[in-house]
Image (tube, rainbow, N blue to C red):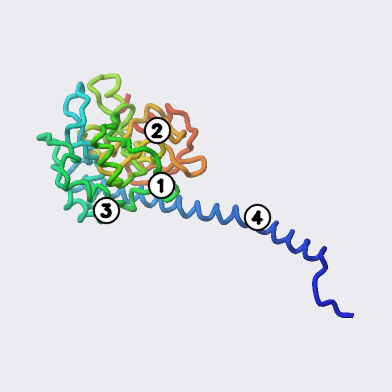
Amino acid sequence: MVRKAFTLVELLVVIGIIGILMALLIPAIQSSREAARNGQCKNNLKQISLAAHQFHGVNRKFPPGYLGPVSHNVRTTDIQWISNFVFLLPYLESTATMNSLDVPIKLLPVSKAWWLNEVNWEPASTEIPVFICPSQPRFSGNSIIALSTLYWARRPTLSALVDNHKLGPSNYAGNAGYLGVMGIPEIDSRQGVLFKRSKIRLADLQRGSSNTLLYGEVTNVEIKHTWIASGSMPTFLGTGNRHWFQYGSFHPGKFNCAFADGRVEALDSKMKSEEFIQLSERLKK
């Protein structure tokens, strides 16, 4: 007699086999997707570092890390406060966004903060793909934005504007060194490449371009980094815990960095802080 259907035992066996195959395939698919996202992230950093080198080729120096206060003793948000990424827009196929901004991009004279001009809010809200790591979850926190290497702001008027405009995010930041430049010799001797109103040349990298960080990944968890305002970060707090003030990522166990020679490399999220800081310093001791 010919059977016309599976027995219950056979059906359960087939379901069990399918379940095992799914359990094996899903991690492989997730791993493959993360590999693709990580590859895109590295490509983003490559494009950003190449743009910085193109800027250097034209201007004989890297762009300033950010246009913060001229004086080291002033804590204010009432100056340009634009990041080095703004200087790179023409080299990242974002000339239209650059042309829509009404912000002086010169070291001197100092001019008013970018957000005081209503014209700037629409272009500043542009999401530019090269500044976004695909592994990074979309920011869902409050309206605090990171302004620069050492400052952040939560002024009521500014916060309301941020809520209304949803500023374009950045998952990358320039290397300011230990604490940038603060007018304190012990700190300034550990400066990086992209700090407040910096004008560093390739020739100024005493440790060599292959041994000096240029950009690295940052996360938007507690505070949102934006391409228009928060273009550089210090390294003194190390890496790895996904805080806004540390370098890190959502890639498993690593974060990507671009070095001043143009190469992109994944660093261990648990690397010792002092090792990371040494990679960020441009001066020999």
Neighbor class of circle 2 (other Cα within 10 Å; few <14, some 14-19, many 20+) is: some
Label 2, secondary structure: give it. Answer: loop
Residue carrying label 1: 138
Q: Which mark is residue 92?
A: 3
- The Cα atoms of the two marked residues, 2 and 3, are separated by 25 Å
Report x, y in % for residue 141: 39, 39
Observer-nearest of 32 and 98: 98
- The Cα atoms of the two marked residues, 2 and 4, are separated by 35 Å
Which badge, 4 or 3, comes first in the chain's sequence?
4
Q: Amino acid at mark 3?
A: Leu
Image point (42%, 30%), residue name? 238
Tell me if I can see residue 147 in this picture.
Answer: yes
Kindly indicate whether the residue at mark 4 contacts the one at mark 2 (C-beta within 8 angstroms): no
Quarter of the image that includes the C terminus: top left
Report whether 183 appears left or right of 175: left
Residue carrying label 2: 246
Residue carrying label 4: 24
Kindly indicate whether the residue at mark 1 contacts the one at mark 3 (C-beta within 8 angstroms): no
Image point (51%, 43%), residue name? 252
